Image (cartoon, rainbow, N blue to C red):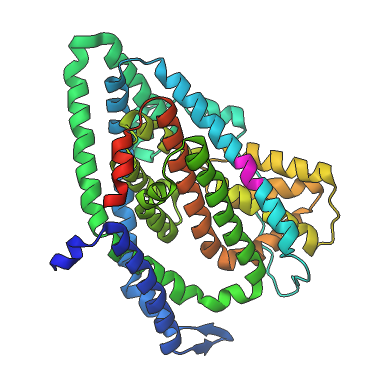
Amino acid sequence: MSWWHKTVLWQRVLGGLVLGVIAGLAFRVLGGTQIVDGVTHYPGAEFVTVWIKPFGDAFVAAIRMLVVPLIFTTLVAGVTGMGAPAKLGTIGVRAIGLYLLTTLVAVSIGLVFGAVFKPGAGVDFTDVAPNPVSTEAPSITERLIHIIPTNPIGALASGDVLAIIFFAILVGVAILVIGEKARPLGAVIEAGADVMFKITHWVMEVAPFGVFALITWVTATKGIETFSSVLVLALAVYLGCITHIIIVYGGLIKFGLRLPLVRFFRGILDAQAVAYSTSSSSGTLPVTISCAQDNLGVKPVVAGSVLPLGATINMDGTSLYLGILALFAAQAFGISLDFGDYLMIALTATLASIGAAGIPSASLFLLATVLTVFNVTPDQTALMVGFILPFDRLLDMMRTVTNVTGDAAVATAVAKWEGELDEEVYRSVAKV
């Protein structure tokens, strides 16, 4: 098995993804079909769900296990190693500013692709079962207050990322202010960060198998034919996300930072593959942090703060998706939009993406919020959600890749501007 370990990890993960697609299709097709009470079942897909998907679930559970301790230890270690607490202010301002800007650009690209591809033209909702979605959610003010944990241990236990970031920064700053007396605690937490990175590397060794299991399940249960009824919408979403990744993130790296672009994308391939298979930015976070530090040379103070923040509030993929779905709804329901409507859709999706961060089914909540801008009724929104749900997982996979890529690009930019980027490590990615 020496060839296995000699093969670069991202190539193994990519191989697992490709083989997963092939295996999933094989199980779906060769397993045949059964019709029970008028509903078509795929025995092959059911076999995959029972016997193969659990390996993927175990992999996801393993990387989720790392999220909270990795965020806390790396952020505290980064703050204490920086020596200047005030520097966190500029890091935060630059990160949030970039996240907001890229989100606004993303929803604008979504509107353009929605106008060009016209995915909602001729769509028939006759056989679609409505799926009502609640628009109730905490206000932005409430969410900001919620960042301050009433119980830090409870925040750690529940995985409240923003609250963990807030508490970790306070701990790091307090260690710096106290000085020599608190240095042993800082050393212990720094050692803890090293331990968590070692465990992350161990978990990533099984990533090819986890990705294989997850993609096999997705392909076996959904099938390629799932896209047939929404082929134009899927094409618009995938091409829109790819365009955003190449032009916005690629432009930031190549022209804004004057760094080699190929090295950036090679450095985050592991994170992208895991993001595509899990559809979870938070779940991918340990891998993203590992890629940013090990492959891109982003130092812990930036990787440990900017990336968790991005996994929580950066929703470029979802914002782009909302732009396309807004046009989809307008076309499907025959609603005419003027320039003001386009502007309000862009602004609403951008601002709501911050306020809705961390809410379960955030994209569906945002859809309901954005569609009300141009008077789509709750019943029409329910029809939209019912139409989207069967294949939303396949679109969500690409949206997550976009989000994770954006997190890494923003972290690299902030690190470069703050002098926290090891360019020697960044430029050595081509050698791996």
Question: Toward which corner of the image does residue 28 lie, by quadrant?
Answer: bottom left
Q: Nearer the viewer, residue 368 or 238?
A: 238
Answer whether residue 106 is magenta in the image.
yes
Can residue 160 be seen in the rendering of this structure?
Answer: no
Side (left or right) of 88 relative to 103: left
Is most of the magenta stretch helix, strand or loop?
helix
Percent coordinates x, y for residue 56 in the rendering? 33, 63
Q: Which residues are magenta?
A: 103-107
Percent coordinates x, y for residue 411 in the rendering? 43, 36
Percent coordinates x, y for residue 59 in the rendering? 30, 58
Question: Toward which corner of the image does residue 208 lie, by quadrant?
Answer: bottom left
Answer whether residue 8 is magenta in the image.
no
Relative to 236, does residue 94 appear above or below in the rendering? above
How many marks the image carries: the answer is 0
The residue lying at 54 percent from left, 40 percent from top is 357
Q: Nearer the viewer, residue 344 or 156?
A: 344
The residue lying at 46 percent from left, 41 percent from top is 409
Image quarter of the N terminus:
bottom left
Q: Nearer the viewer, residue 314 or 163?
A: 314
Side (left or right) of 32 relative to 79: right
The residue lying at 28 percent from left, 65 percent from top is 209
Can residue 42 be seen in the rendering of this structure?
Answer: yes
Relative to 208, does residue 70 appear above or below in the rendering? above
Percent coordinates x, y for residue 321 in the rendering? 62, 54
The residue lying at 58 percent from left, 68 percent from top is 390
